[in-house]
Image (spheres, rainbow, N blue to C red):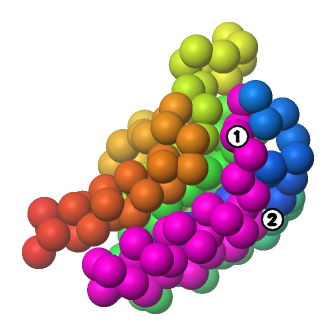
Amino acid sequence: MNVLFLNGPNLNLLGQRQPEVYGKASLADIQEQVRDRAAKLGVSIDFRQTNHEGELIDWIQQSRGNVNVIVLNAAAYTHTSIALRDAIVAVGIPAIEIHLSNIHAREDFRHRSLIAPVCQGQICGFGPFSYILGLEAAVNVINIRV
C-alpha cells in the first residue's frame, strides 16, 4: 500500500510559525512520526511539501496508478483552490483532508473547505497527531474498498 502525503504553503515553517496555533513540531518531526507508524503498518509513504498550488496539482495528477490514497494538508489552499479540488476528482484516488488546527474554531474564512466534499473525510484539530490519524484513515479506506 502506498500513501502520498502532500503539504501545502507555509507548512515548511512549522515549529517556527505561530506555535500557539500549529505547535512546536517541525514538518520533519511530523514526517518522522508518520514514517515510524507507517513502517509498523507495512505502508509505504511519500511525504512532500510545496508552497506552489500548481506543484500540488502536478503531484496529484502524477499519483494516478502509483498511490492508493492521498493524505492532503492543503493549508490555505483548502479554502481557495477549485483547481486542487478538480485535481482530486480527476485522478479518482481516495483523498483524506487533514489539518493541524481545528479550522472550524478559527477565523470564519477557514470554516469552508473547497476540498472536503471530494475527500473521504476530514481530520482537524489534533496537531501532529492529525497526520497519524490521516495515515490510519488511509489504511482503513483501502481495507474497506478491498
- Report the amino acid beneath label 2: Thr
**Neighbourhood count class around disc 1 (C-alpha, 10 Å): few under 14, some 14–19, many 20 upward:** some
**Which residue is found at the position 67% from the left and 23% from the top?**
110
In the displayed orientation, state which residue is furthest to the top. Answer: 108
**In the structure shown, which secondary structural element does the residue marked by tag 1 occupy?**
loop
Horizontally, residue 31 falls left or right of residue 26, namely left
Quarter of image, res 53: bottom right
Residue beneath disc 2: 50
Of pointers 1 and 2, the one earlier in the residue sequence: 1
Residue beneath disc 1: 23
**In the structure shown, which secondary structural element does the residue marked by tag 2 occupy?**
loop
Horizontally, residue 39 falls left or right of residue 4, namely left
Tag nearer the camera, 1 or 2? 1
Range of residues picked out in magenta:
21-49
- Report the amino acid beneath label 1: Gly
Q: Distance between the residues labelled 1 and 2?
A: 20 Å
Residue situated in front as seen by the camera: 23 or 93: 23
**Quadrant occupied by the C terminus:** bottom left
**Which residue is found at the position 66% from the left and 16% from the top?**
106
**Which residue is found at the position 57% from the left and 41% from the top?**
127
Q: Where is residue 42 in the image (x, y as percent from the top left)?
A: 31, 86
